[in-house]
Image (cartoon, grey):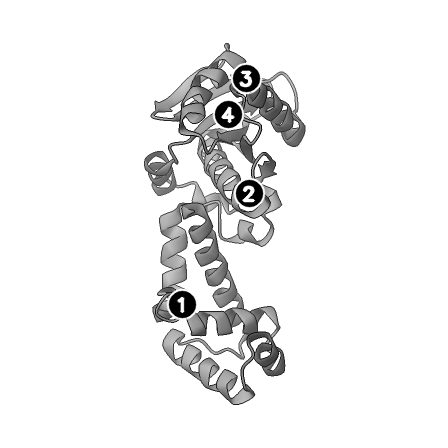
Amino acid sequence: MCAREAAASAGTRADFQEGLPKREAFFVVRGGGPTSGPSAYIAIAFASRDAAIAARLRVTVAELAPDARVVRSRAGVAAAVRELTGPVDARAYAESLRSRLANSTGDGALSVGVGGPKQGATGAHLALLQAEQAVVLGRALRGEGRVTLFDDLGPYCFVLGRPESDIREFANRILGPLADGERYADLVRTLDSYLRLHGSLNGVARDLFLHRNTVRQRLRRISKLTGADLKDADSRLALQLALLGRQALERLAS
């Protein structure tokens, strides 16, 4: 798993409980029996662009799992826990639930996100956070009506799986003034191109239709504003993760 377990702290749980989108229903599945050690959890989030359908998702999920224990209920959001007798193929299970819920609600564009598996009660909170981020970002990246596992998010996994406040704090700390993307849009585009093209000045110049001297000037300004040594591999990695985090936050807010 690419998300760090440290993300599931008390702060993570509090931030998650306060920050859930209102057009989603959550379904939590517990796998394993009483003798298999700590319970493992996956979370499945369902989202609809239609507010009326989203409101019915809560009822539909409850009907789909009548033996489930509802552990959270709020406007447009429901969570339930159910113990399974054996392992589950998370993607196939989510696809099956998506199909049944789409038929029940009449929403063929219903989107699904899957988080986990994670162990223990703390892991369940982390799995829920992953599911929420997977359904929102997956919808933005891949379109409506799909199942997106958290691990499908590729490099975004390295910055997600934690509260949005933590992602924002990291991006702001690493990018400094460049975190204000509107004010420094040209510099952000230059930095993104520089990192994507592995530090090639000629590549950046071609990519952004700039003169090499302009690229050099911008890179010097980026280094001054962020305090980063662009020749240092660790600094470049931190900047790349910060830009990924910023992009993820923009997509989660869309």
Label 1: how many Cα within 10 Å (few below 14, some 14–19, many 20+):
many
Q: Judging from the image, what secondary structure is the residue with disc 3 in?
A: helix
Q: Nearer the viewer, mark 2 or mark 3?
A: 3
* Disc 4 + disc 1, Cβ < 8 Å: no
Residue named by callout 3: 104
Disc 2 crowd rating (10 Å Cα; few below 14, some 14-19, many 20+) is many
SS category of the residue bearing label 1:
helix
N-terminal of the two: label 2 or label 3? Answer: 3
Q: CA distance from mark 4 to mark 1?
A: 36 Å
At label 1, which amino acid type do we have?
A: Leu
- Which of the image's four quarters has the N terminus? top right
Query: For the point 43% across and 77% down, which residue is it?
Result: 222
Q: Quadrant of residue 93?
A: top right
Residue 238 drawn at (x, y percent)? 49, 65
State which mark lies toward you, 1 or 2.
Answer: 2
Of the image marks 2 and 4, the number of the one nearer the N terminus: 4
Residue at which label 4 appears: 28
**Gap between marks 2 and 3, in whole Å?**
22 Å
Task: State the CA–CA distance, disc 2 to disc 4.
Answer: 19 Å
Cα separation between marks 1 and 2: 25 Å
Query: Residue under circle 2?
Result: 138
- Residue type at numbered disc 2: Gly
Element carrying mark 2: helix
Which residue: 65% across, 31% down? 91
Query: In this image, 184 relative to 88: left or right?
Result: left
Amino acid marked by disc 3: Ser
Q: Amino acid at mark 4?
A: Val
